[in-house]
Amino acid sequence: DIQMTQSPASLSASLGETVTIECRASEDIYSNLAWYQQKPGNSPQLLIYDANSLADGVPSRFSGSGSGTQYSLKINSLQSEDVASYFCQQYNNYTFGAGTKLELK
Amino acid sequence: QVQLQQSGAELVKPGSSVKISCKASGYTFTSYDMHWIKQQPGNGLEWIGWIYPGNGNTKYNQKFNGKATLTADKSSSTAYMQLSSLTSEDSAVYFCARDGGYSDFFAYWGQGTLVTVSS
């Protein structure tokens, strides 16, 4: 199975700051990479698919990039509503990263 | 709009089975894979398997072979997952999720069903 290594596990940032979350795949996943946001008590919500495509209704401050085995999610100008956990997922055989818990500083 | 409505929380005894449902609306049920995902408290997400309701084809994460059985009822646009021989390790929130159509990211998610295994 393809392993997804996500970092950092937790992150504390200030309002307005730019944050970046990384995911590394154990082999080339050919941009079959999605990012999800999950708030406590809720189901995950799709943010980014195909590594860099913004899902419908997602604010443009979210962006994804990467190729091969290295991918990242960037949040520009952090807002209070962005406090959540974030997961990457490769969809060749559906493994997820362990998640990043984003909090406000 | 696409909606996936899951059945309510379950409290079940060790060794028993449970069947949870996911009723789909707002799209053609038979045209998209339905996936199931496990999330244990404080833990990450684990893919269980998918079913294609159009023909009943399934694929499972090897870890869940023999544990999970996926079915779908086209007449009611409802997908089901049965979990058998339950242990405390099966206590988790289970989500259904529909794929994106042309690609296998999870575009829409149900609200989750909490399964608690306890005597």
Image (cartoon, coloured by chain):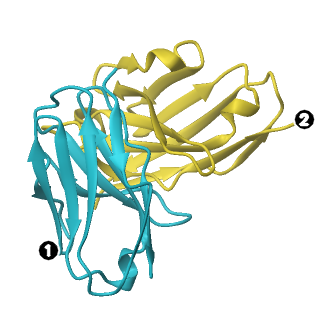
Residue B27 makes an appearance in the image:
no
Question: Marks 1 and 2: which is nearer the front?
Answer: 1
Q: Colour of chain B?
A: yellow
* Amino acid type shown at disc 1: Ser
Residue B16, placed above or below residue B98: above
Image quadrant where residue A2 sits = top left
In this orientation, which residue lies closer to the viewer: B65 or A74? A74
Q: Which residue is drawn at 20% across and 65% down?
A: A74
Question: Residue B36, how many percent across, how many down?
Answer: 45, 35
Q: Which chain carries label 2?
A: B
Residue B62, placed above or below residue A78: above
Badge 2 local density, few (<14 within 10 Å), some, or many (20+)? Answer: few
Q: Which residue is drawn at 38% across and 42% down?
A: A97
Q: Check the picture and name the quadrant holding the N terminus of chain A.
A: top left
Q: Check the picture and name the quadrant holding the C terminus of chain A.
A: bottom left
In this orientation, which residue lies closer to the viewer: B47 or B110? B47
In this orientation, which residue lies closer to the viewer: A47 or A65? A65
Q: Residue at x 12, y 39 (%)?
A: A31
**Colour cyan belongs to chain:** A
Question: Residue A26, how many percent across, how many down?
Answer: 26, 28
Pointer 1: what residue? A60
Pointer 2: what residue? B119
Q: Which chain carries label 1?
A: A
